Amino acid sequence: MSSRMVTIAIVVQMAAVVATSAAIRGDEPPPEPATAMVLVAGNVWDGLADASLGPMEILVRDGRIAGMGRRVERPDGAPVVDLSGHTVMPGFIDCHVHVTMRPEDEGAIWAMSPADKAVLGVQALRILLDRGFTTVRDLCDMDFGGYTTVSLQRAVEKGLVAGPRMIVAAHLVSTSGGHGDARPLVAVQTPVTQNNLADGVDEIRRVVRTEVSRGSQWIKFGATGGFASPADDPAQVPYSQAEIDALVSAARDLGIPTTPHAYGDEGIRRSVMAGVRSVEHGSLASLETLRLMEARGVYLVPTQIAVVRFARLIDDDAFWQAVNEPPHVRAKYRRHAKAILESARNLSTCGVKVALGSDFGTFPLGQNNAAEFAELVANGLSVPRALRAGTSVAAELLMRDDIGVLAVGKTADIVAMPGDPFDDITVTERVDFVMQGGAVVRGGQ
Ligand SMILES: [Zn+2]
């Protein structure tokens, strides 16, 4: 980093301090952010191209990209940020996170209040932003009495909490005994209530409508069992076709897209037939089902660091000791490992739209969710397809045409990393400059 860069970082940090103290005093508005800034990039990838585009300058004005080219206009007084040793890309988008979840808390969910979960969420959002994720889709909370992730989404939108802008599906709508039934985590005599359980079309419609009225922008549902849940199997198909049809149409009538948690082929197929917008995991999808998804334009969010990695390392005792999962999890992976690896290979041979999702919240906080880029490449996806998964294709899935691409007029969500991801995809795990909506939120170290 140049000294100029350090100076800008200090100015930005000072502005943040001033903004915070003004907000506390409540007697004056926060200072206006710098209206214009020029980024001098050693290399640019725009979110779309099949290769890096080389050195370029980007003019940011009023939160948007106002110019891009070998040389851009330099308005009077506009700070210049030296990113000459860096590749500059659109801000990353993770389409599958759980900001209020931690793997070690699974058994303790009933002991946590919405406030406890909100604190975890604030911590996670800052970490995600620092890693270059400027937008995330949070796909459920285990807050079965409240809507903490909706509160967090609103807090980010208001500027009360620093973090990626959030798009939220509050809970996993699940059958009794399905992937979202957390009662097996407590003794059978313990009475618990959950706001996400729905059996039969009438209950499903009621729960969907309640979720939407409480602020869910997506509906996620459990179309198959899972690996982590103790009482089911990834190949099980708890919801009937009629139930999934009812869920998707109830959401569609409210203008809300749907996405299933789905590992097994039959659960994926039923969901695709019902008209879902995306599929989470999809890890046991047959080639035929992947082609059906491609034909129907359904996005796949394969969460490979949270699934394929486990199948790939099924015989690695040291790995399983380190991840510290209960024995039923490894047993299930052993049963399905071959099919998971075959399905991951098939993904690279068909054109289904892949959007990046990591399942952040199901692995330790210190593990960088940007490792999903490298995992996609390790399992056969081309580098541009993996990079598009976490930028332009993710934005398309989320119906946000203002992000995921660097072009004039787009929102200035911009990250930089010291190297070229086309030479080494793991450089995406070393982001050290982050701009969100035209404001520098990380940089200078
Ligand atoms: Zn998940």
Image (cartoon, rainbow, N blue to C red):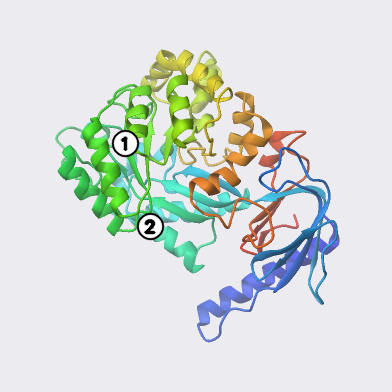
Q: Percent x, y for residue 348?
A: 58, 24
Q: Residues within 10 Å of mark 1 (few under 14, many from 20)?
A: some
Position of 302 compared to 181: left or right?
right
Residue bearing mark 2: 150
Q: Which mark is residue 225?
A: none
Crowdedness near tag 2: few (<14), some (14–19) or many (≥20) residues, C-alpha within 10 Å? many
52 on left or right of 123: right
Q: Residue furthest front?
A: 295
| View extreme (bottom): residue | 27
Name the residue nearer the viewer: 422 or 375.
Answer: 422
Q: Secondary structure at mark 1?
A: helix
Tell me whether the residue at label 1 lies in contact with that at label 2, contact meaning CB atoms closer than 8 angstroms.
no
**Residue 263 percent coordinates (x, y):** 39, 27
Q: Is residue 145 visible?
A: no
Quarter containing the N terminus: bottom right
Please tell me which residue is depicted at 51% across the width and 16% down the height of the picture: 342
Residue 62 position, x and y percent, is 65, 71
Q: Does residue 395 appear left or right of residue 209 in this picture?
A: right
Q: From the viewer's perspective, is residue 347 above or below residue 174?
A: above
Dot 2 lies on which element?
helix
Total numbered labels:
2
Image vertical order of residue 157 relative to residue 41, above or below? below
Say which residue label 1 marks: 274
Q: Is residue 441 left or right of residue 146?
A: right
Q: Quadrant of the C terminus?
A: bottom right
Query: As displayed, is residue 291 above or below residue 172?
Result: above
